[in-house]
Amino acid sequence: MVGGYAGKFLEVDLGQEKIKNTVFPEQVLRDYLGGRALAAKILWDRLGSKWESIDPLGPENIFLALTGPLTGYYPGIRICCTGKSPLTNGIVGSTVAAEFPIELKCAGYDGVIVTGKAKKPVYLYIDDDRQEIRDASHLWGKTGKQTIKLLNKEVIEDLEKRYRLKRMWREPGVLYVGPAGENATRVAAVMMKWTHGAGYGGYGGVMGSKNLKAMVAKGTGPLPAAANMNETLKCIENVTQSCYASDGMRRWGTGSAGYEVGAGTSSEPVRNWQEEWHDERTFGVDHFERRVWLKRYWGDYGCPTTCLKVSAVLDGPLKGAITDNPDYETQAYVGTNLGIFQPEGNVYVNAKVDDLGLCGIQAGNVLGFAGELYQRRILTKKEIGFSLRWGDAKAFGRLAEMVAKREGIGDVLAEGVYRAAIKLGKQKGKNLLLYAVQAHGMAIGAHGTRSGLDYEPITAYATSVQGSDHTSCGGMGPLQGAGDSLWGFADSAVICGFNVFDNNLDPMWRMLRAVTGWDIGVDDWVNTMGPRMITIQRAALLVGGPDAKWDPDKDDDNPPRFYKPLPSGPLKGKTTSRKQVQKDKVKYYQSLGWDARGIPTTETLKRLGIPELEIVFKGMRK
Amino acid sequence: MSKTTKVWVARDYLNCSGCRLCEVACALKHEGRIWPEASRVRVFMLTPTLEIPHLCAQCDDAPCIPSCPVDALSRSDKTGAILVDAEKCISCGKCIDGCPGRVPFLHPQTNKAIICDLCDGDPVCSKVCQEGRYNALWTVSGAPSKSYKLYAKTPDKVTEELAARMYRDLAKELI
């Protein structure tokens, strides 16, 4: 087998209760690696001809959890969760960290492909010898913390009793959904380890719609062998030293940004993006460190950065909340975006969101949207059931619960901000999309474009084939840190983008060769493999789904709010130039070999080896 | 005078980040592979956020040694590590039951008992932990202390104590 791959994927048909091994030809793996790119290939091959009619929350959708060849070798382990997205109707590579991927690879599998829908709640159990669909009725409705507790106990007990090897067994790797996923909300994440979520894309709801509560893996084998182990180890050491050198990231994680992005770059969501500036020193990372952090370094298998921190509120009215950091995105989305400027309040809502299995970004965005509707008296206390004042952590926590359980007003908010704005707008006779901060149906990352000082280009959300995320965003050059191309590689080799240093990329490309033994490198990815993945994603995004379709001329754009002047702070009055967005978009599209409207040309499709997509794009060209 | 330099791997569970670089280093050193379930140090995470590096504590009385029915276990004169004679080992697992911390385990491929060998006096697990400035593991050498045998405890017990320490009255819900 090729180095770095276990060599087989587990394919599970939940409807027929059938499990089998699937093997892809070496050329397919070489062209698509794994994770996001391979998923795009699998999804389009299997569903492309009927893409538009597939309901992402129906049994026809496919859920994939895929590793890549560098998973477990390159420091910073992740797994890529994907399928047809209930938010964008496209393909979103959504990755999440923790130990499930290494357990899966050590059990002999590169990924899991799930089709159909189980008749009742189930979980998938995988070890080296056994692959089983097991009953999960007793886990249904349970929070993340309860799910892990119950699963760890029952799986360890079973291993002690039934497994061939004698030892004191430790916990398995667990990938799961909380109540938000079970109830097929569009704002649910695929979760691991209490607090880690693959949120973008809304794949928690896809697992839930299949009655799939969790996947559990325990592998006792070694990580699949690398083609050249000595060279691989040299690359690991090189990356490790880069991780150790990034002291700020180790010390604070992304948690220093909760203050800095507001006070410094004026690009943090404040009260549903009505403002992007704040200077609340109570929200400084030093306060988090002293008031809520219980562990200074927390991380996942093989990561020298350990940017996570364990946080808890142990006293007072918000007692009982336990989560990580919070990291920047959740400091912003379930902090400043809800008018919360105290670490305890932020930890409280973040822990709620984690326990319920909601995506911090998608849920935080729609909660902020509800907050603004309440502020504008478009939604009333009666409709919500209680007052929803900015800064009230308990009220927003309660609303998060209603969203996850689809109760009351939570039912419409569970559709995500785009669909909620349309539905509520119809009821109210108002254009509520003005307050929905999203692109292509997905809430955007917590980095605004108006100040022009954040890392995101002004076309990041408008041109993203992922929809509108802040990690693999559009509009950036091929080797720029958070660009669709470079981060797309991280999502496909399936490693953590935070350990990819754009001033030290060489060990990553070298490791790709050392692990796989293939003679491929940066040029192959940048010129062919990356653009091919992005182009397939573009096809899926523009073909759309039964409930939403995107018009490249209208929908490849920023949220309307981003063209209003910033109302406060030292950069008051600054805004995004609509003209410049149009210009930059054309430039970015053309760099990919697409036409000015973002439709790939016939020549490009041929050059990328995907001429079969011509039939999709032909009718879209003008 | 004996030339023995006994070493121990001391540990502070509260400092463990769960990064498991110790396991990566241990498996690479002993197996030449990244291999979580063959690493002599295994980090238990029965409850997330409570990570317990679990490895031999080289108890003075070493109850594992007499528990072995075929005399496969012995103590190294040089380091004090418990050494396994793989040729003698019959994979019965009695050393696991004999250990108060249930530390030994059978190798996933050879099915022979494996126990931390202290890397012949220079344990790589504590080296990488120190390099990462976590300070969850470090090497102590010199005069033996009775206290090190207290580390020979099962991870579930340590988890309970750690949970109470970190989460106080919330601990019960979590573990």
Image (spheres, rainbow, N blue to C red):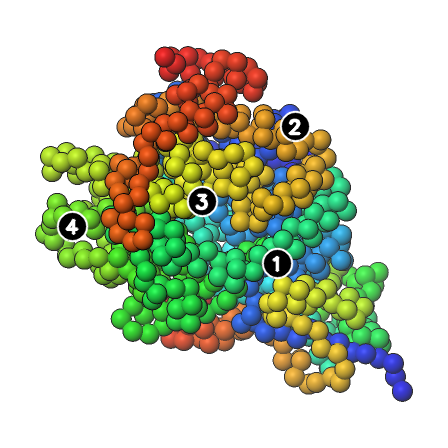
Residue A71 in the image: state x and y as whole percent. Answer: 60, 44
Going by the image, does A427 lie left or right of A237?
left
* Camera-side residue of A487 and A203: A487
What residue would you read off at disc 4?
Answer: A374
What residue is shown at x 47% (from left), y 15% (from top)? A601
What residue would you read off at disc 3?
Answer: A455
Q: Earlier in the sequence, mark 1 or mark 3?
A: 1
**Subunit of label 3:** A
Q: Earlier in the sequence, mark 2 or mark 4?
A: 2
* Camera-side residue of A132 and A142: A142
Quick one: label 2, few (<14), some, or many (20+) residues within 10 Å? few
Q: Mark 1 against mark 4, which lies toward the viewer? A: 1
Q: Is residue A130 above or below residue A8?
A: below
What residue is shown at x 39% (from left), y 37% (from top)? A458
> CA–CA distance between discs 2 and 4?
55 Å
Outermost residue on the right side: it is B1
* Camera-side residue of B152 and A557: A557
> CA–CA distance between discs 1 and 4?
46 Å
Going by the image, does A25 lie left or right of A233?
left
Outermost residue on the bottom side: it is B1
Quick one: label 4, few (<14), some, or many (20+) residues within 10 Å? some
> CA–CA distance between discs 4 and 3?
32 Å
**Subunit of label 2:** A
Check disc 2 and give the amino acid type: Glu
**Picture quadrant of residue A578:** top left
Residue at mark 4 shares a chain with residue at mark 3: yes
Q: Earlier in the sequence, mark 1 or mark 4?
A: 1
What residue would you read off at disc 2?
Answer: A26
What residue would you read off at disc 1?
Answer: A244
